Image: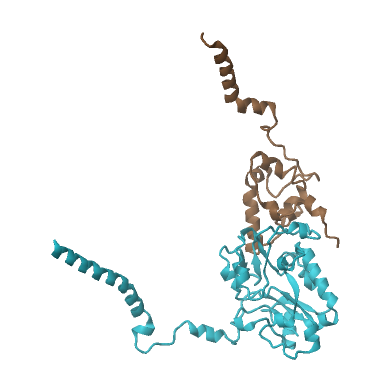
């Protein structure tokens, strides 16, 4: 009896050790770094190194983008207010009195908040005093889309717009955490009472939904320009067009002027450019 | 018969109780079939025949939603010269402008509570704070 118990415990012990150890050994021997003495550099690092600072891959299809000429807005700051209110009217954007509930589609922010990887040390008076126009960058590689668990936010392949389907948004706010530009806002309360004027062609949102700039997809479909672009028409303050079309007005501006993007080092490939 | 005084009133109460749905429907308007009000503008055609719309408008709306938002297909439907930009607010509610008398009449009867109007504006609501361009 004693003999049997001793044997049983030995076998049980050995099995437990083997069971716990085996997967680890299989995993180690399967990874190339351990299997062959001289390991090739881990494959995961190569593409990241290439993306950093490298030219973007050959463009395909339409990729809508925008150049914002801040010099024009510095001369006429009221023009930016006009563009913002055009956006608010077009999309039934609520105006919450408390700043922490603010819903932002197109909004204003100082240079050091917009271009966080640029030094604002001893910047010119004009830069220090100008409010920059900020909106969703409609990134070519949008982190919000990867974060969304319901595919409520997604990239429209035919236009490059990072769009939202409010019907599907469950309000988890993962996209807000993922977006490095703060371009997404959450409706903490029912927005309806805080909408000043209704555009009857566009819905409002409900409590618990995230919203952001949609590059006026609904206006583009009707052959109109985005509301902010239309509000600054004729001044050249905002140029809108296809980044992948070499003949577009947008490309002409990009070819001529020195432009910067927001946080380019993150590799999100923003489609909004700034002339500072 | 023993206890006539208790049994007969008891039976009457029982029968009344069991037939409650029948006489309640007869006495009140709760069971009447809803009569949704047709478009006040007098439009006679819709994007699909009325029978189809009555049964399948929710599927059609979902299809439009996916077309417009997800597939970027915002092609404007044109039927007999009338243009219908896909959308609850841009197409449906332009004719059926009385949500309270059209949509609600059946939805209330069928005890369904669609969440369309959590976000979408009814013409009455939109008119309450209109954009004045």
Q: Position of residue A132 (x, y in %)?
A: 76, 79
Task: State how the image is colored.
Answer: by chain
- Residue placed most toward the observer, B115 or A19: A19
Q: Position of residue A172 (x, y in %)?
A: 60, 63
- Residue placed most toward the observer, A244 or A164: A164
Disc tally is 0
Residue occupying the point 81% across, 75% down: A80
Considering every residue shown, the one lying at the far top of the view is B1
Q: Colour in which chain A is shown?
A: cyan
Q: Position of residue A117 (x, y in %)?
A: 66, 85
Q: Position of residue B112 (x, y in %)?
A: 64, 44
**Quadrant including the N terminus of chain A:** bottom left
Answer yes or no: is residue A177 visible.
Answer: yes
Query: Which image quadrant is residue A262 in?
Result: bottom right
Q: Is residue A197 above or below residue B18?
A: below
Considering every residue shown, the one lying at the far bottom of the view is A122
**Quadrant including the C terminus of chain A:** bottom right
Query: Which image quadrant is residue A72 in?
Result: bottom right
- Residue placed most toward the observer, A185 or B133: A185
Chain identifier matching the brown colour in the rendered picture:
B
Q: Is residue A96 left or right of residue A154?
A: right
Answer yes or no: is residue A233 visible.
Answer: no
Q: Is residue B18 above or below residue A203?
A: above
Residue occupying the point 52% across, 83% down: A47
Q: Is residue A251 above or below residue A144?
A: below
């Amino acid at each position: 009896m004693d003999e049997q118990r001793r044997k049983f415990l030995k076998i049980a012990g050995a099995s437990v050790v083997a069971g716990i150890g085996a997967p680890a050994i299989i995993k180690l021997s399967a990874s190339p770094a351990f299997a062959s003495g001289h390991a090739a550099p881990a494959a995961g690092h190569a593409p990241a190194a290439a993306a950093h600072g490298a030219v973007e891959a050959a463009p395909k299809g339409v990729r809508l983008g925008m150049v914002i000429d801040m010099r024009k807005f510095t001369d006429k700051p009221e023009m930016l207010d006009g563009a913002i209110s055009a956006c608010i009217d077009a999309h039934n954007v609520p105006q919450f009195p408390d700043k922490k509930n603010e819903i932002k589609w197109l909004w204003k922010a100082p240079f050091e908040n917009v271009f966080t990887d640029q030094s604002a040390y001893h910047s010119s008076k004009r830069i220090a005093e100008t409010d920059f126009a900020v909106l969703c960058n409609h990134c070519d590689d949008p982190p919000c889309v990867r974060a969304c668990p319901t595919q409520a936010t997604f990239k429209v392949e035919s236009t490059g717009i990072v769009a939202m389907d409010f019907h599907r948004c469950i309000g988890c706010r993962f996209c807000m955490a993922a977006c490095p530009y703060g371009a997404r806002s959450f409706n903490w309360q029912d927005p309806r009472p805080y909408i000043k004027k209704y555009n009857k062609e566009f819905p409002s949102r409900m409590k618990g939904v995230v919203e952001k700039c949609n590059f006026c997809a609904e206006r583009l479909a009707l052959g109109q320009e985005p509301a902010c672009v239309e509000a600054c028409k004729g001044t050249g303050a905002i140029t809108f067009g296809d980044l992948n079309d070499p003949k577009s007005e947008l490309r002409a501006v990009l070819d001529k002027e020195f432009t910067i993007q927001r946080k380019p080092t993150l590799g999100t490939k923003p489609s909004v450019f700034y002339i500072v | 018969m023993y206890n006539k005084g208790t049994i007969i009133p008891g039976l009457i109460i029982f029968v009344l109780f069991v037939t409650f749905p029948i006489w309640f429907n007869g006495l009140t308007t709760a069971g009447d079939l809803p009569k949704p009000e047709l478009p006040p503008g007098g439009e006679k055609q819709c994007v699909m025949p009325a029978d189809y719309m009555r049964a399948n408008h929710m599927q059609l709306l979902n299809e439009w939603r996916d077309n417009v938002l997800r597939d970027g297909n915002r092609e404007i439907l044109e039927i007999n010269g009338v243009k219908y930009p896909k959308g609850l607010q841009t197409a449906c509610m332009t004719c059926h402008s009385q949500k309270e008398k059209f949509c609600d009449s059946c939805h209330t009867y069928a005890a369904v509570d669609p969440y369309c109007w959590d976000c979408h504006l009814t013409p009455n609501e939109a008119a309450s704070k209109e954009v004045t361009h």
